[in-house]
Amino acid sequence: MPRMDDAVVVITGANSGLGYAGTKAFAQKGATVVMACRSVERGRDAAESIRSEIPDSSMFNLEVQACDLADLASVRSCAERIRDEYDAVDVLCNNAGVMAIPRRETEKGFEMQLGVNHFGHFALTVELFPALRAADGEARIVTQSSGAHRTGSMDFADLNWEESYSKWEAYGRSKLANLLFAYELQRRLENAGIEEVTSLACHPGYADTNLQMRTAEESGNPLMKLGMRIGNRLLAQSPEMGVLPMLYAATADASGGAYIGPDGLFDMRGYPAIKRSTDASYDHENAQQLWRRSVEATGANLSLTDFSQADESLPAE
Ligand SMILES: NC(=O)c1ccc[n+]([C@@H]2O[C@H](COP(=O)([O-])OP(=O)(O)OC[C@H]3O[C@@H](n4cnc5c(N)ncnc54)[C@H](OP(=O)(O)O)[C@@H]3O)[C@@H](O)[C@H]2O)c1
């Protein structure tokens, strides 16, 4: 990674797993990292821990901002504070996520996995776009997907799983939505002739983080917890390895629309390489339909002709 002394990086889910590893890596390169976390307390603890792990903590800056992706008002005010505080944002990492949890809803009534993993990030991206557009040089929007996007399908008649719910299929859909969004955003940027902001996607392979433990805890099945723990021990790579595709997408020589993932066995581990996601993730029609539904759901709409601000801000509470 290059030095990032003047760069401002915003990363969601920065207090744990890949977000924590990513924050630390950006900080080691001198960046200012805005840790957008659901819990400010957990964010501060994580920031403290990173400061204690990097010898010269005067060389970087960590700032924690509250951002609950399940609450659009929280997303909007997080983006507002960031826009107020910084002239520009160089990198946005849409990283936070939940996996295969029992059906719950966000405060606007969206199924939680799609709500947090996709809608929340869609809104955050739109709200931060003016700051990304203001960066000196190329700004990057990196969206964290998963190999699980392979199991996802879009059912626009029941996007929010109101008729039936499968927690793993819902996770797959949310991760497919991450890719449809990342690629559609890149196409829209290209169509608008904007080269200075690019949208890329990545996935970590299989990394040992809290993600699996949370899934197991929420399942209420002690055997699942044991299984996840053993799986993580035997098969997963470290969060420091798992985050490499995100770091690569954020800083290396890669073009908008690229999908970066580990180059090793079954795409589960290894060093970052440019990969291809499923054909379904490149489906333009579904991407456009998802975009329309995301605008409708969040009230956030990206204007690429007027860079000064988003068309419509999120609906007032
Ligand atoms: N680990 C893997 O093997 C793997 C594989 C494929 C894809 N991924 C993807 O990688 C990303 C990061 O996951 P991870 O593995 O690092 O898991 P993790 O350790 O559980 O971290 C997830 C992060 O997301 C945050 N989060 C959850 N709900 C949120 C909400 N409503 N608003 C804001 N933040 C929220 C969590 O905050 P709290 O700590 O407050 O809950 C945490 O900081 C996810 O998008 C996941 O789908 C991971």
Image (spheres, grey):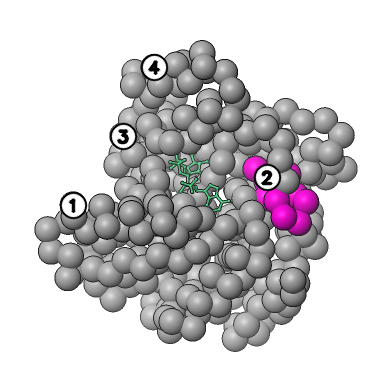
Please name the residue that numbered disc 4 is placed on: 230
**Residue at point 33% right, 30% down?**
237
Residue 89 falls in image quadrant: bottom left
From the viewer's side, name the closer residue of 251 and 100. Answer: 100
Q: Are marks 4 and 3 in contact (CB under 8 Å)?
A: no
**Image vertical order of residue 224 relative to residue 115, above or below:** above
Is the residue marked 2 within 8 Å of ligand 1, measured from its CB? yes
Q: Secondary structure at mark 2?
A: helix
Upstream in the sequence, badge 2 or badge 1? 1
Q: Secondary structure at mark 1?
A: helix
Upstream in the sequence, badge 4 or badge 3? 4
**Residue at point 17% right, 65% down?**
57
Quadrant containing the C terminus in the rendered view: bottom right
Please state which of the two labelled residues, at mark 2 or mark 3, is closer to the viewer.
Answer: 2
Q: Amino acid at mark 3?
A: Ser
Mark 2 to mark 4 CA distance (whole Å): 27 Å
- Side of 43 where 176 appears, left or right: right
Q: Are marks 2 and 4 in contact (CB under 8 Å)?
A: no
Please name the residue that numbered disc 2 is placed on: 112
Label 3: how many Cα within 10 Å (few below 14, some 14–19, many 20+): some
Please name the residue that numbered disc 1 is placed on: 53
Upstream in the sequence, badge 2 or badge 4? 2
Q: Amino acid at mark 1?
A: Glu
Q: Secondary structure at mark 4?
A: helix
Q: Which mark is residue 238?
A: 3
Is the residue marked 1 within 8 Å of ligand 1, measured from its CB? no
Mark 2 to mark 1 CA distance (whole Å): 34 Å
Q: Amino acid at mark 4?
A: Ile
